Image: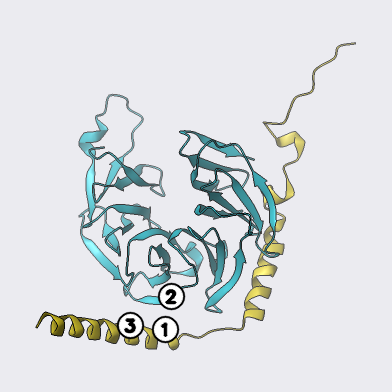
Amino acid sequence: MPCTWVMACAYAPSGCAVACGGLDNKCSVYPLSLDKNENLAAKKKSVAMHTNYLSACSFTNSDMQILTSSGDGTCALWDVESGQLLQSFHGHAADVLCLDLAPSETGNTFVSGGCDKKANVWDMRSGQCIQSFETHESDINSVRYYPSGDAFASGSDDATCRLYDLRADREVAIYSKESIIFGVSSVDFSLSGRLLFGGYNDYTINVWDVLKGTRVSILFGHENRVSTLRVSPDGTAFCTGSWDHTLRIWA
Amino acid sequence: MSSKAQSSNNLNQARQTVQQLRLEARNERIKVSKASADLMNYCIECARTDPLLMGIPASENPFKEKKPCTIL
């Protein structure tokens, strides 16, 4: 990659391409191939152009569209083939740090979280912000939809994770402890949505019981801050990436 | 003159915020008691298929610790 920091990457639903981007303000798509002789860098396609760093990217239901969020305060939907901007989403007052698409059964919406402490829910077709939640006290680093699509969780630099219900249009739970003072970098739900995993900047992972609001467990192992966390699609394990240069799988 | 431009900018911003808030106010909301009941039901229904909650039977776990083999 031409730039020094890659801040976002995503797999295409078919598994045949990856998109990535970062400080180069662009999102590029690379087709994957098992052929070692192929020069993949030559096949790279530059899809998105922002005026500031790319913080997150995600393919929509198909390989043909990509959703991106950027430090320029906007999110945008792009057509991969032509590189054309299909829709842009304005409303955040500061850098947008994360986004997550609604699970496919619930329609064309996505949620984004930003440095303005707000989490916004957007309609992908109209570009309109449908709902907005502002209860965090600091930057929102990570947002993730609840498996049913009716709620989403967010993790923030204010050391809390919060659960927002979309139909009730309000925050319904806060996951925090006085002893936790370091920000959350990444959150994800277990398959059933009963457990919420949070990767923290104090090198630990806290596991919360979503319904009771209590901490189930704390996991140690990383030697530096946990920067990203994702549960596997079959729900049997989750993986964390950290500033200690390792990826660990927990099961 | 620049302060006029600034204040008109602020005015525009305020107008946009008010418009956005009006749109959001029209959203239909349900009661939290119903919303949380639904979340709970979803959790309980899906709990059986959640390997991180229920655990994986030892026969299928490729990472389980192996006991030493003793030969009579």
The residue pinned by badge 1 equals B24
Chain (cyan): A
Position of A30 relative to A150 (above/below):
above
Looking at the picture, the colour scheme in use is by chain
Chain colored yellow: B
What SS does tag 3 mark?
Answer: helix
Give the farthest residue toward the left.
B1
Q: CA distance from mark 3 to mark 2?
A: 12 Å
Tell me, yes or no, whether the two marked residues, 1 and 2, touch with CB atoms within 8 Å.
yes
**What's the residue type where badge 2 is placed?**
Ser
Asked if A76 appears above or below B4 in the picture, the reply is above
Pair 3/1: label in front? 3
Q: Quadrant of residue A111?
A: bottom left
Q: Using the image, name the chain to which the residue with label 3 belongs.
A: B
In the image, farthest residue toward the right: B72
What amino acid is found at the position of numbered circle 1 in the picture? Glu
Side (left or right) of B40 relative to A44 = right
Q: Residue at x 32, y 65 (%)?
A: A94
Callout 3 amino acid: Thr
- Quickly name the residue at label 2: A132
**Mark with earlier residue (3, 1):** 3
SS at mark 2?
strand
Image x and y of residue A72, in percent: 26, 61
Q: Which residue is mark 3?
A: B17
In the rendered view, tell whether residue A68 sits above or below residue B60.
below
Residue A150: x and y in percent read: 55, 70
Q: Secondary structure at mark 1?
A: helix
Dot 2, how many residues are within 10 Å of its Cα: few (below 14), some (14-19), or many (20+)?
many
